[in-house]
Image (cartoon, helix red, strand yellow):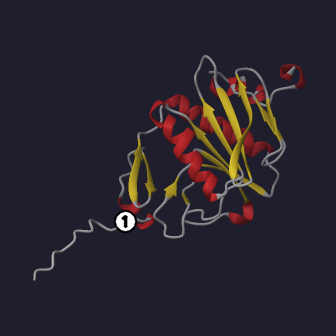
């Protein structure tokens, strides 16, 4: 009687394997031990990410920290690793080399190749990980938009979608407001206008 051998394939990757990935501008994440690679972001994506990080960082109370592209281990096995475009954490929850606790807010800026991932895959992953707030930003120059999702009873509920020069006002993770239009519009005017005003909101 011959006993056949079962090829189990390579072991799942962990965050330890990420140190071997090249520093080429692409984003290397892990999904159930498999590498998930995204191309380097285009300039408008970088502009949105940078402006949002600056704006939130200026208005955040001292007990919060606003970080750009933090690595987050979303399971104890360290085989599932995500890198949101922007996140807000409690300062006390900062860790190195990667975060292991759910941030208070995760933000993804949608690109053509990431639409399904951001709207569906990451939404489910962030939901299961217990991230209280998730924003999805569409940086379309003609009509930029943001969708705000909040975790309620274990699932995300859409609480607002704001477009163009309208103002998003929210109290999560802290009271804030901003205008999608000024995330994408060229020039320096965004610095004083991104927070919106009562007149603009009306």
Mark 1 is surrounded, within 10 Å at the Cα level, by few (under 14), some (14 to 19) or many (20 or more) other residues, namely some
Q: Where is residue 106 in the image (x, y as percent from the top left)?
A: 64, 48
**Number of numbered discs present?**
1
Camera sees residue 41: yes
Report whether 156 appears left or right of 84: right
Instruction: Give me the residue at 73% from left, 61% from top.
Output: 91
- What is the quadrant of the C terminus in the image? top right
Quick check: 113 left or right of 58?
left
Quadrant of the image for the N terminus?
Answer: bottom left
Which residue does the image show at 22% across and 68% down from the upper left? 7
Residue lying furthest left in this view? 1
Vertical arrangement, residue 6 with respect to residue 140, above or below: below
Residue 69 in view of the camera? no
* Residue at (68% x, 34% y) in the render: 147
- In the image, residue 61 lies at what x, y percent? 82, 51
Farthest-out residue, front: 1
Q: Residue furthest right?
A: 198
Instruction: Give whichever of 193, 16 is nearer the camera.
Output: 16
The image shows residue 64, relative to residue 14, as above or below, that is above
Q: Is residue 164 above or below residue 4?
A: above
Q: Is residue 136 above or below residue 65?
A: above
156 or 177: which is nearer to us?
156
Q: What element carries label 1?
A: loop
Which residue is denoted by mark 1 in the rendering?
Answer: 12
Q: Residue 58: horizontal and vertical position, in percent?
A: 77, 43
Residue 47 quadrant: top right
Q: Which of 144 and 160 is in front in this view?
A: 160
Q: Where is residue 149 in the image (x, y as percent from the top left)?
A: 70, 42
Furthest residue to the top? 142
Q: Residue drawn at (63%, 37%), measured in percent from left and top?
A: 136
């Amino acid at each position: 009687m011959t006993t056949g051998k079962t090829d189990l394939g390579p072991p799942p990757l962990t965050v330890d394997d990420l140190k071997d990935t090249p520093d080429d501008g692409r984003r290397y994440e892990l999904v159930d031990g498999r590498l998930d690679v995204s191309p380097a972001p285009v300039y408008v994506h970088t502009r949105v990410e940078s402006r949002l990080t600056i704006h939130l960082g200026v208005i955040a109370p001292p007990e919060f920290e606003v970080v750009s592209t933090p690595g987050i281990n979303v399971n104890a096995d360290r085989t599932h690793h995500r890198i949101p475009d922007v996140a807000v954490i409690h300062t006390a929850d900062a860790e190195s080399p990667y975060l292991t606790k759910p941030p208070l807010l995760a933000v993804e800026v949608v690109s053509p190749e990431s639409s399904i991932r951001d709207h569906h895959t990451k939404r489910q992953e962030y939901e299961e990980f217990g991230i209280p707030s998730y924003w999805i930003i569409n940086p379309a120059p003609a009509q930029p938009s943001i969708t705000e999702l909040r975790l309620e009873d274990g699932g995300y509920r859409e609480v607002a979608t704001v477009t163009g020069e309208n103002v998003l006002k929210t109290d999560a993770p802290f009271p804030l407001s901003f205008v999608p239009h000024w995330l994408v519009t060229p020039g320096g005017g965004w610095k004083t206008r991104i927070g919106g005003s009562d007149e603009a909101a009306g």
